[in-house]
Image (tube, helix red, strand yellow):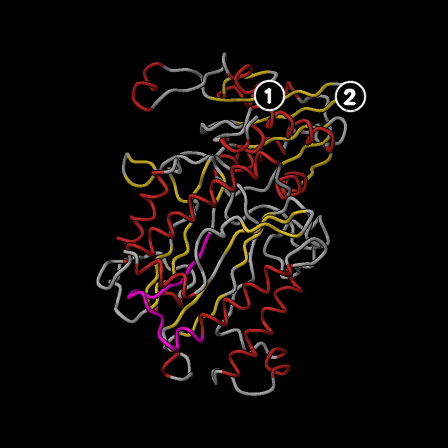
Amino acid sequence: MDLAYLTELPMAEFAERRRRVFTQMANNSVAVLFSAEEQTRNNDCNYPFRQESNFWYLTGFNEPSAILVLIKQGDRQESVLFLRPNDPLMETWHGRRLGIEKAPSALNLDKAFDIADFEKIFPELTQNLSCLYLRPTQQDCAKARAEFCAKLPHFSEQENFALILDEMRLFKSRAEIALMQQAAQISALAHIRAMRETRPNRMEYEIASEILHEFNRHGARYESYGSIVAGGENACILHYTENDQPLKDGDLLMIDAGAEFAMYAGDISRTFPVNGKFSDAQKDIYQLVLTAQKRAIELLVPGNCVQDVNAEVIRIMVEGLVELGVLHGDVETLIQNEAYRPFYMHSLGHWLGLDVHDAGSYSKDRNNADRNSKKRDRPLEPGMVITVEPGLYLSEKLDIPEKYKSIGVRIEDDILITEYGNKNLTSAVPKEMEEIEALMAEK
């Protein structure tokens, strides 16, 4: 397999993942996983379908209304899929279906049944099993079916399937890394295009469309999340997605955007001047964030943890804000009192993979499935992919020197933890100020 030109995962990889799940399941148990469902946008119109990430991780199957059932009983290890049958009329209107007959061979599964027969067949398949693995879900249809499974009287134990899946997804295979490198590279090309196409009086959504155009040109049909294209004060709104304001001469533009390639997410943030030249005040804040980000990348290596690296980032930024006259007082006291919170209110980064905020515990306690836990003391290991995105947000509402108001800066790269340290997957996008200004001058 030539990983350099990989555009999708081979079916053998999904089968290997299921094999690894079986090794971790208790005997006499069944694991159940539900697909995503189509979501209504407005009357008679759906959003583009995107498969639920865990379901995709174990099947590679991209249709709604499906259920994966994994059965382990002694030597019996069965992968069973419930899915929609072929329907010529519905396929004429809404597109092709894989169908029950083709599913086992196409997906390397043991059996397939009609989704309409799930409530009838599932109890028969599992009648001699005692342990049920389910993953917590908010999806109404899946929730109802999960409740049906959980109420079956022969299941005396119930386990959280997420504790197995999240840990597996945290460590990327060689093939996954190859796809993520492509997602990162496409994302990088889009950010470079955005820099070249930005100028005063263009609309934020125009730049967003340039980004999406570049994604599509290179085989990434979708964003991995809604692009943030935030000029001036808008950059101080962390998840700004309106993207409907004109770009003003003299403002910075902060873009947080990533391509989804073969289901894997890219995630890059860059901040640059709308007119192509950083002002002195913009340089002060930008260089402070860049210094912190580069130091974080140096420290994100096997054995270190995000919590400790973030502490170093906070120290760098507090010292810098004191030097600039934005914060006042003793550095240690300011850190202890979290005086930086109005300027840096998010964490240093997050896992990246099939989801832009990917699965996996950040805590030493690997049974802690809460991805939002404040404890981020888990030592980094090769195969993990994490974003590095310190930022400073100096809103016009804050009591700070006037020259620094409405400056929001975030710089973000995607880092693969390796045996030898790390690899920056998104280094193709300039982030040194002189490089950005030179690139923008080329337009």
Residue 281 is left or right of residue 365, and the answer is: left
Q: Residue at x 62, y 25 (%)?
A: 15
Q: Is residue 4 magenta?
A: no
- The image quarter in which residue 292 lies: bottom right
- The image quarter in which residue 3 lies: top right
Residue beneath label 1, please?
A: 80
Q: Is residue 220 above or below residue 113?
A: below
Q: Position of residue 285 (x, y in %)?
A: 45, 73
Q: Residue at x 46, y 16 (%)?
A: 99
Report the residue that reaches farthest toward the left: 201
Q: Position of residue 394 (x, y in %)?
A: 42, 74
Residue 189 is left or right of residue 145, and the answer is: left
Question: In front: 418, or 105?
Answer: 418
Q: Position of residue 359 (x, y in %)?
A: 59, 45
Residue 279 is left or right of residue 181, and the answer is: left
Q: Residue at x 31, y 69 (%)?
A: 251
Q: Which residues are magenta?
A: 268-284
- The image quarter in which residue 126 lies: top right
Of the image marks 2 and 1, the number of the one nearer the N terminus = 2
Three-letter residue code for mark 2: Gly
Three-letter residue code for mark 1: Val
Q: Is residue 271 above or below residue 288?
A: above
Q: What's the mark number on residue 74?
A: 2
Are discs 2 and 1 less than 8 Å apart at CB? no
